[in-house]
Image (spheres, rainbow, N blue to C red):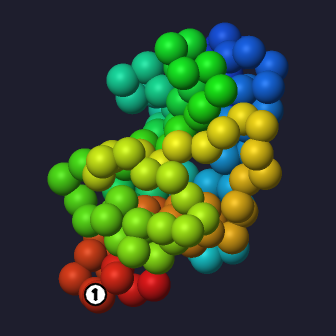
Amino acid sequence: MKAEVKAKFESYPEDARERLQQLRALVLEVAAEENLGTVEESLKWGQPSYRTKDGSPLRIDWKPKAPEEYAMYFNCSTRLVDTFRELHRDELQFQENRKITFNLGETLPEQAVKQCISIALKYHKVKHLPLLGA
């Protein structure tokens, strides 16, 4: 983990940090399981950001103005969040076409989140497919 990303994680309150580290681990797990190549980890707009060669960047963050929530952000000019909403409207909470929000006090729906991560990390290979190949 790059020093700047590590410092960002260390700046979060403990409960948020643990949840964001869980999301980070899922990103790396999905990329490895699906042989998606190297995951580039950096800070974009002050948020931990993850991208593969054929993917669309996804970012994760927690904000003090919504202390019970953390989120995964996606490029709003893609069809990603609209597709995720179609696939997981009963399991996940969405805000517009840019993010999935999670509650710190609730169990993360891992399978749904892993599918969203998978699609984002290979977006440029599947963007022409119905439901992005899901």
The residue sitting at 66% across, 39% down in the picture is 103
Q: Which residue is mark 1?
A: 129
The residue sitting at 29% across, 52% down in the picture is 97
Q: Residue furthest left?
A: 77
Q: Which residue type does callout 1 highlight? A: Leu
- 49 is higher (above) or lower (below) than 51: above
Looking at the rendered image, the quarter that the N terminus falls into is: top right
Closer to the camera, 125 or 109?
Answer: 109
Mark 1 is surrounded, within 10 Å at the Cα level, by few (under 14), some (14 to 19) or many (20 or more) other residues, namely few
Looking at the rendered image, the quarter that the C terminus falls into is: bottom left
Residue 91 visible, this angle: yes
Left or right: 107 with respect to 95? right
The residue sitting at 80% across, 20% down in the picture is 14
Give how far across and how far down residue 96 sits, in percent: 30, 48
Closer to the camera, 98 or 88?
Answer: 88
Left or right: 133 with respect to 17? left
Q: Quadrant of residue 55?
A: bottom left
Give how far across and how far down residue 17 sits, in percent: 73, 26
Closer to the camera, 40 or 49?
Answer: 49
The residue sitting at 29% across, 88% down in the picture is 130
- 28 is higher (above) or lower (below) than 36: above
Residue 51 visible, this angle: no
Closer to the camera, 39 or 97?
Answer: 97
